[in-house]
Amino acid sequence: MIEQRPTEERRRASAALDEARLRQQAIGVRLRQMFDEVVSEPVPDEFLEILRRADKTSAEKG
Amino acid sequence: MAEDRADRPPRTPADDEAFKRELVQLIPHLRAFARTLAGEPAGADDLAQDAMMKAWDARASFQMGTNMKAWTFMILRNQFYSEKRRSWRQTQLDQEAAERTLVAVDDPEAPVALDELRLSLAQLPAEQREALILVGAGGFAYEEAAEICGCAVGTVKSRVSRARKALHVILDDGSYERDGGAAGDAMRSILADAERLSTVR
């Protein structure tokens, strides 16, 4: 095993890395939240209506 | 063999029923993806409806048991870009659209951080934005996102990574800034929110 003796510099670099990672995570959470917000909206009736009509047409065609 | 388009395996009503059930479950996701591509909700729902109908019409070519979400997202994306190509000169307009959004989204009621994230996203090149959305929010693997976008896996990876970096920079230095509002607030608020959300899980 390589002994890791963190110098002040290395500690600072790794703190900066942690900070960057945390920020990226935060952006990721927000991004998902933005997307999920729309996913959890109730689906407008129009969608199901259109699909129902199309299904009926294709059933009639046989 | 497959040269005759009419010569498809016969579909049973049960096939259609199963397909429809799965398609209905995907509608909320199609709406969300459409919203990120098209921006404003009304146009996005039109896009999602078109994609849904295209998927329904093409149901005979879909193999049940494979990834229908990726398949429908691909249809939606193709639909979006073919419409866009028809009506707009493509790349130039992304910037203009972003600027228009800057004005249009100026709603005092909107939660700050989410609003700023949307504005920042709008400033990314379209291919970076969609890659980041698919992987970062849509829950797709890089391989699936590559299939949806019709490009190599490595290309998706580099787009996502560039998008993340760019988004970070935009949010951090407040390039989205409007009306001289305080830059840096968005990032702070995003961080605070993420912390809260991650503890709630």
Image (spheres, coloured by chain):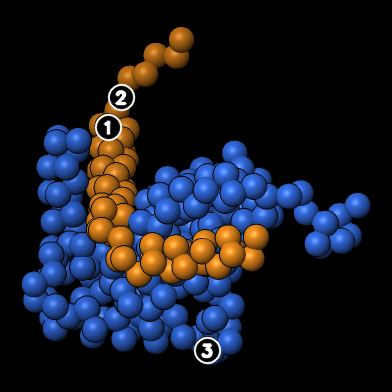
Residue highlighted by disc 3: B88
Q: Callout 1: helix, strand or loop?
A: helix
User: Dot 2 lies on which element?
Assistant: loop
Label 3 in the same subunit as label 1: no
Depth check: B83 or A48 in front?
A: A48
Query: Relative to B105, does residue A39 appear above or below in the rendering?
Result: above
| Nearer the observer, B169 or A31 | A31
CB contact under 8 Å: marks 2 and 3: no
Residue A6's tag is 2
Amino acid of disc 3: Trp
| Chain under disc 1 | A
For the point 28% across and 72% down, the residue is B119
Residue B33 shows in this picture: no
Residue A28 x, y percent position in the rendering: 31, 49
Q: Which chain is blue?
A: B
As measured in the structure, the alpha-carbon distance from the residue carrying label 1 to the one carrying label 2 is 6 Å
> Alpha-carbon neighbours of circle 2 within 10 Å: few (<14), some, or many (≥20)?
few
Secondary structure state at the residue bearing disc 3 = loop
**Residue at horizontal 38%, vertical 73%?**
B44
Query: Amino acid type of disc 2?
Result: Pro
Crowd rating for badge 3 (residues with CA inside 10 Å; few <14, some 14–19, many 20+): few
Q: Colour of chain A?
A: orange
Q: Which mark is residue A11?
A: 1
